[in-house]
Image: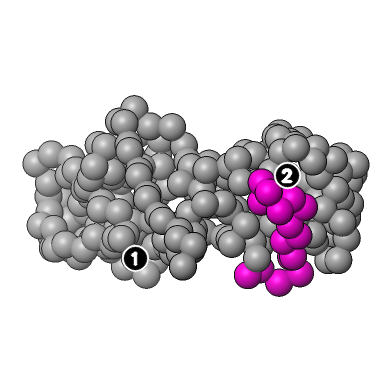
């Protein structure tokens, strides 16, 4: 009797083991081939797995011989396919980048501080707006700032055309000018002008209004203008713009 019971239990265990399958896959980037950490794969609302540092994942205790696998990861398009079990080898899943995500530009400074201690509003003039305005007048960047609220361009020299930046009604010497986060020259340098800055070299212009002297120095009482240039590339790029003025 005991032998018969052992045989029955063995048969039940073998049937149960045979009916359960395991799904194995590796999640990678379709372009670079690098494994993706944290990708999610699921075959039901309550059954799934997350990929490790090598992009590998496993879903065990699958009773069905045909499953629908859905794989998702932030910044990538969702992947879905019907898989037959058991598998003969680990499945490689290449995820494509989601083209619908908008570009996000993050600019950092060299100093360390928390966002709670820095409630600063930054106005940005993007590259598209820079190209549009430079087509109108490529001589200087004064036109880029003249249309921003709270900013006035004051001409300091009729012969050279030098102009200073007045923010919130304060004199131009209280406006700090930065290039990629570093001071270039302040309003006290009367012989220098923003006309000496080529507009075609700019990728973005950031404007901060208000007293920021504690962060950027004593020249930023009225505010500051940060001129962000293009990132150098290995491939040479040439941009040329020609305009003409007449006395008519």
Question: Is residue 79 rendered to the left or right of residue 180?
Answer: left
Q: Which residues are magenta?
A: 147-163
Indicate the quadrant where residue 136 lies: bottom left
Crowding around mark 2 (Cα neighbors within 10 Å: few <14, some 14 to 19, many 20+) is many
> Badge 2 is on which residue?
177
Question: Is residue 99 rendered to the left or right of residue 52?
Answer: left
- Residue lying furthest top in this view? 234
> Badge 1 is on which residue?
100
Nearer the observer, disc 2 or disc 1? Answer: 2
Provide residue 155's location: percent of width, then percent of height.
Answer: 73, 57
- Label pair 2/1, CB-CB below 8 angstroms: no
Indicate the quadrant where residue 74 lies: bottom left
Along the line of sight, the residue nearer the viewer: 4 or 94: 94
- Label 2: state its secondary structure: strand
The image's colouring method is one colour
- Let me know if residue 63 appears in the view: yes
- Residue lying furthest front in this view? 248
Residue at figure coordinates x 16%, y 62% from the top left: 81
State whether residue 133 is above or below residue 32. Answer: below
Magenta residues, dominant SS class: loop
State whether residue 220 is above or below residue 185. Answer: below
Provide residue 34's location: percent of width, then percent of height.
Answer: 30, 35
Residue at figure coordinates x 74%, y 50% from the top left: 157
Provide residue 138's location: percent of width, then percent of height.
Answer: 48, 54
């Amino acid at each position: 009797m005991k032998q018969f019971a052992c045989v029955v239990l063995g048969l039940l265990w073998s049937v149960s083991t045979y009916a359960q399958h395991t799904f194995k896959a590796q999640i990678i980037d379709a372009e670079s081939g690098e494994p993706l950490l944290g990708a999610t794969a699921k075959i039901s609302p309550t059954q799934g797995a997350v990929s490790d540092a090598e992009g590998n994942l496993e879903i065990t205790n699958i009773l069905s011989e045909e499953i629908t696998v859905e794989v998702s990861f932030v910044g990538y398009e969702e992947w879905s396919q019907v898989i037959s079990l058991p598998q003969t080898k680990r499945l490689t899943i290449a995820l494509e980048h989601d083209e619908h995500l908008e570009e996000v530009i993050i600019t950092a400074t060299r100093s360390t501080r928390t966002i709670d201690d820095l409630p600063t509003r930054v106005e940005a003039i993007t590259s598209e707006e820079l190209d549009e305005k430079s087509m109108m007048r490529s001589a200087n960047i004064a036109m880029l700032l003249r249309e921003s609220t709270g900013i006035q361009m004051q001409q300091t020299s009729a012969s050279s055309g030098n102009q200073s930046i007045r923010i919130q009604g304060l004199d131009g010497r209280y406006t700090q000018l930065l290039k990629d986060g570093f001071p270039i020259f302040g309003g006290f340098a009367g012989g220098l002008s923003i006309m000496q800055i080529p507009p075609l070299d700019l990728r973005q212009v950031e404007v901060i209004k208000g007293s920021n002297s504690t962060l950027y120095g004593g020249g930023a009482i009225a505010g500051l203008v940060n001129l962000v240039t293009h990132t150098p590339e290995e491939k040479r790029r040439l941009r040329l713009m020609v305009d003409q003025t007449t006395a008519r």
